[in-house]
Amino acid sequence: MRGVLFFSFSGLIVDAMRILRVITLLFVFMGIGAATPTAQGQARKSSKGGNRIVKMEMRYTINAPGKTSRVRFLLLVPSDLPYRQRIINKKWILPPTKTHQREGGTEVEWIINKPKPKTELGCVLTIELSPYDFSQRFKDKKAGPEGMEPYLKEEKFLEKSSPSIISLAKVSAPKREAGERLLESLFSGTLENLKTHGFVNEARGADLALELGGGDCTDFTDVLVTLCRVRGLPARHIRGVIAAPFSRSDTPKHSWAEVYIPKNGWIRLDPYLTELGRADYKKLKNNYITFSYDRNDEVGNYWRFWSWGASISVTERLDCGHGVFTETVGGSPKK
């Protein structure tokens, strides 16, 4: 009798388990219980196609003496860019006073009256990065809200009327070359005429970099962008961060280029890391976080500040998960 009862009870358990499996499958097909995916779940999903999730902290500590009456602080912050990056989450350390959408990023502004001796601001972001190099060149064919004119003109640091720049643009590629072949020739011309000098703490521009025969990532990018503009290829100087390990003497901040080829689209290129052997003309790692497309915006080098009443200093802490970069900068008050 016990055997019969045990068998029947076991059968009920088996039947119940079968029913539970059916219900579970129905829930999966209907999407119930998956309305709010976690960052970990998004990371697993994003692994398809080479996408990756990066967490970045941008923290700035303002050290202000008691006589400081006012502080203005500007900061470049990444924003959503089609085919390149998506902001999953953004948490402000201190809510900003204003935000301004710029080409390729967001300019954030804080106005702090009668600041405390120490004030922290900035943000923590979770960003989904998408691979974007030569192989994805057909994805983004948009010229931008103002067309191609801004990416063909001469401007500060991109001196397309410089005789040495014009000469190199002519020598690097025959007049008949166009499109991808022209771009490859100009890219090669950049590398053949520049050597890596390491980080340079000053803005020099394409003409001076070519005269000196080298420079850092900013200089390499300036030269390539300017050569492209001389030969009629729209090009822009990109400022951002590389989410990858870096040495103590280096910085994760980086510059690279994007060049537009008709019928193809925008192409991301990194002449400096290619020269160092850490990148390839047609293949780049999915490490690039874009902050700005504008070489000459008001912010300048990622962030900028002004003070009234007294001199202040600002300490930057930038963490992309591959080490922490810190820097302290002082400044005189405005009169």
Image (cartoon, rainbow, N blue to C red):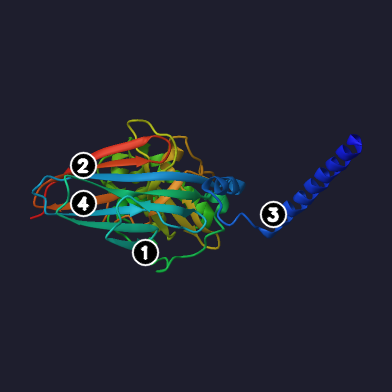
Crowding at dot 3, Cα within 10 Å, few <14 / some 14-19 / many 20+, comes out as few
- Structural distance between the alpha carbons of marks 2 and 4: 10 Å
Mark closer to the chain start, 3 or 4? 3
- Structural distance between the alpha carbons of marks 1 and 3: 49 Å
The residue singled out by tag 4 in the image is: 305
Q: Nearer the viewer, residue 265 or 124?
A: 124
The residue type indicated by label 2 comes to: Val
Crowding at dot 2, Cα within 10 Å, few <14 / some 14-19 / many 20+, comes out as few
The residue singled out by tag 3 in the image is: 28
- Structural distance between the alpha carbons of marks 4 and 1: 27 Å
- Structural distance between the alpha carbons of marks 3 and 2: 54 Å
Point 69% across, 56% down: residue: 27
Dividing the image into 4 quarters, which one contains the N terminus? top right
Crowding at dot 4, Cα within 10 Å, few <14 / some 14-19 / many 20+, comes out as many
The residue type indicated by label 3 comes to: Val
Element type where label 3 sits in the image: helix
Mark closer to the chain start, 1 or 2? 1
The percent coordinates of residue 5 (x first, y second) are 88, 40
Residues under numbered marks 1 and 2 in contact, where contact means CB atoms less than 8 Å apart: no
- Structural distance between the alpha carbons of marks 3 and 4: 52 Å
Specify whether 142 is left or right of 56. Answer: right
Q: Nearer the viewer, residue 321 or 276?
A: 321
- Structural distance between the alpha carbons of marks 1 and 2: 32 Å
Is 261 above or below relative to 15? Answer: below
Residues under numbered marks 3 and 2 in contact, where contact means CB atoms less than 8 Å apart: no
The percent coordinates of residue 239 (x first, y second) are 37, 50
The residue singled out by tag 2 in the image is: 329
The residue type indicated by label 1 comes to: Pro
